[in-house]
Amino acid sequence: MAPSSAPPPIFDPEPLLPAALSLGGHPLDLPHVDRPLLDLLMLLEGSMRLMSVAELCAKYGYRSTRSYYEKRRLFERQGVAGLLPQPRGPKRPSRRTPSVEQRVVAARVRDPDLAAAQIAERLRAAGVRLSARSVERILSDYGLTRGP
């Protein structure tokens, strides 16, 4: 049985860059190639208009021109920092804390006829910002939805 080899990478950036770039006549060695650098090179090459945006995206491993325009917009607004990877996920803590869930469940148990919007309104009056849809999700998660 032949040893299994790793599948080839979907996008290989090495052919895009020479082993060393020149900066002011001095060689600039690149220890590794990273995505922000490639994005910057793509934008620089795009500004020269030597090929279509679609061809440019294909060359740099993107499947649609939307990627190019999004990178360009980020670069115009934030500079090179806009090309750096951003953390994924929520940008702020969830409003659906255990104590909020407890208050929603307690409101439903106290008054089973209250609609989710009414519970949300009562929570809002008490200083808790939570949408009616979030209240519906909580009630559903706890099996406390009302029948039709």
Image: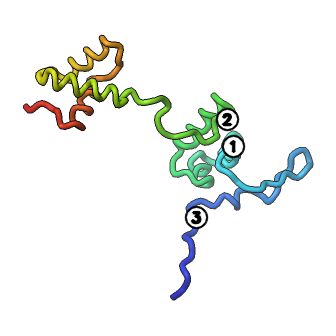
- 63 lies left or right of 148: right
Q: Is residue 72 in sight in this rendering?
A: yes
SS label for mark 2: helix
| Alpha carbons under labels 1 and 2: distance apart | 11 Å
Residue at 69%, 36% in the rendered image: 80
Going from the N terminus, do you reach mark 3 or mark 2 first? 3
Going from the N terminus, do you reach mark 1 or mark 2 first? 1
Residue at 69%, 43% in the rendered image: 40
Where does residue 31 sit, x and y in percent of width and height? 77, 56
- Disc 2 residue type (three-letter): Ala
Rendered view: 75 above or below 32: above
Q: Could you say which is closer to the camera, residue 20 or residue 122? A: 122
Where does residue 131 sit, x and y in percent of width and height? 30, 23
Tag nearer the camera, 1 or 2: 2
- 133 lies left or right of 77: left
| Alpha carbons under labels 3 and 2: distance apart | 26 Å
Residue at 62%, 55% in the rendered image: 59
Rendered view: 131 above or below 11: above
Q: Is residue 49 in sight in this rendering?
A: no
SS label for mark 3: loop
Where does residue 73 sit, x and y in percent of width and height? 59, 33
Q: Could you say which is closer to the camera, residue 69 or residue 14? A: 14
- Disc 1 residue type (three-letter): Leu
Binning the other alpha carbons within 10 Å of mark 3 as few (below 14), some (14 to 19) or many (20 upward) gives few
Q: Could you say which is closer to the camera, residue 35 or residue 90? A: 90
Q: Find the residue positioned furthest to the left.
A: 148
* Quadrant of the image occupied by residue 3: bottom right
Q: Which residue is mark 1?
A: 40
SS label for mark 1: helix
Q: Find the residue positioned furthest to the bottom.
A: 1
Q: Which residue is mark 2?
A: 81
